[in-house]
Image: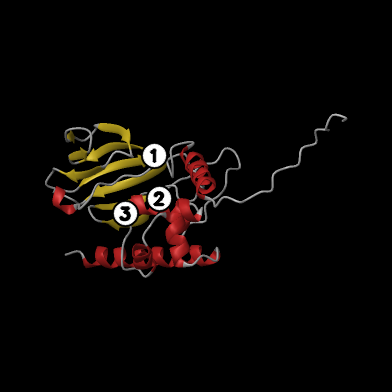
Amino acid sequence: MDTTHTQSSASSTADLGRRVRAARVAQDLTIEHASRVCGVSRSTLSKIENGLMSPTFDVLQKIVAGLKIDLGELFGSTPKLDSGGRRALTRRGAGKPHAYRGYSMELLATELAHKAMLPFLVRITAHSIDAFDDWGRHEGEEFIYVISGSVCLHTELYTPTHLEAGDSLYFDSRTGHYAVSTSKEDAVVLWMSTGETVPGALEAAEAAEAAKAIATAPATSARPARSRRKLPPG
């Protein structure tokens, strides 16, 4: 067993939890309120904040969208806003580590805020579908390019797709999905997501929420306006 890797994963999980809590507290949100705005159960959010759970990418996206922060902030980066001509260089092994069930990843280019793409270098540690108890799904679109090993991508809509080194696949992240390594060694892939949401999805969700609030608001009794029409002379 690689105890160094295990200790590193535990440390990064604890650090991430502290940053989630700091972001919540900085906005004066109770854990109950944060749970509602993020769409994550209170129990799950509490476990993450206390370093007892390593969140999936789906949950990370919900947290950053709900707290309106950048993903890089949860991994110790201070993302820079767009100032024109921006770029980000990530040296080999210098990405921000994050591991959860079935995957061990490095987040790349975390120093840039509001990226259109979220790039990851992912080692797929799952070699069986038994590693997953549910589909992964979230807003956005994804691209996978297999660097080494072989992969089988399982989705809700299609038969399992087998990918070898050099193969790639682009798909809708809202479709339930997970990937397993079918090679003897862990497969390594470049995995990219379009970010927090598909363009326009957040605005649509906010508009729908506003419409729902209006529809469920209690009716108020207003006094009928008096007519300004003059009566004809008698």
Foreground: 112 or 59?
A: 59
Q: Secondary structure at mark 3?
A: loop
Q: Residues within 10 Å of mark 3 (few under 14, many from 20)?
A: some
- The mark tally for this picture is 3
In front here: 188 or 40?
40
As drawn, the residue found furthest toward the bottom would be 50
Identify the amino acid type marked 1. Answer: Gly
Query: In the image, is residue 208 above or below residue 130?
Result: above
Q: Return the disc, 2 or 3, that comes first in the chain's sequence.
A: 3
Of 193 and 62, the residue lying toward us: 62
List the single residue furthest toward the left.
184
Question: Which is nearer the N-term, disc 2 or disc 1?
Answer: 2
Confirm or deny contact between disc 2 and disc 1 (CB under 8 A).
yes
Q: In the rendered image of this protein, does residue 102 appear above or below residue 8? A: above
Let me know if residue 95 appears in the view: no
Q: Residue at x 40, y 63 (%)?
A: 16
Residue that numbered label 3 is attached to: 56
User: Which callout, 3 or 1, points at the residue further toward the start of the chain?
Assistant: 3
Q: Residue at x 52, y 56 (%)?
A: 78
On the image, numbered disc 2 is attached to which residue? 61
Q: Amino acid at mark 2?
A: Gln
Q: Is 159 on the left or on the right of 57, as rendered?
A: left
- Res 74 seen here: yes
Q: Does residue 7 lie above or below 59 as drawn? A: below
Q: Is residue 140 left or right of residue 144?
A: right
Residue of label 1: 140
In the rendering, at what x and y percent does residue 120 appear?
A: 35, 46
**Image quadrant for the N terminus?**
bottom left
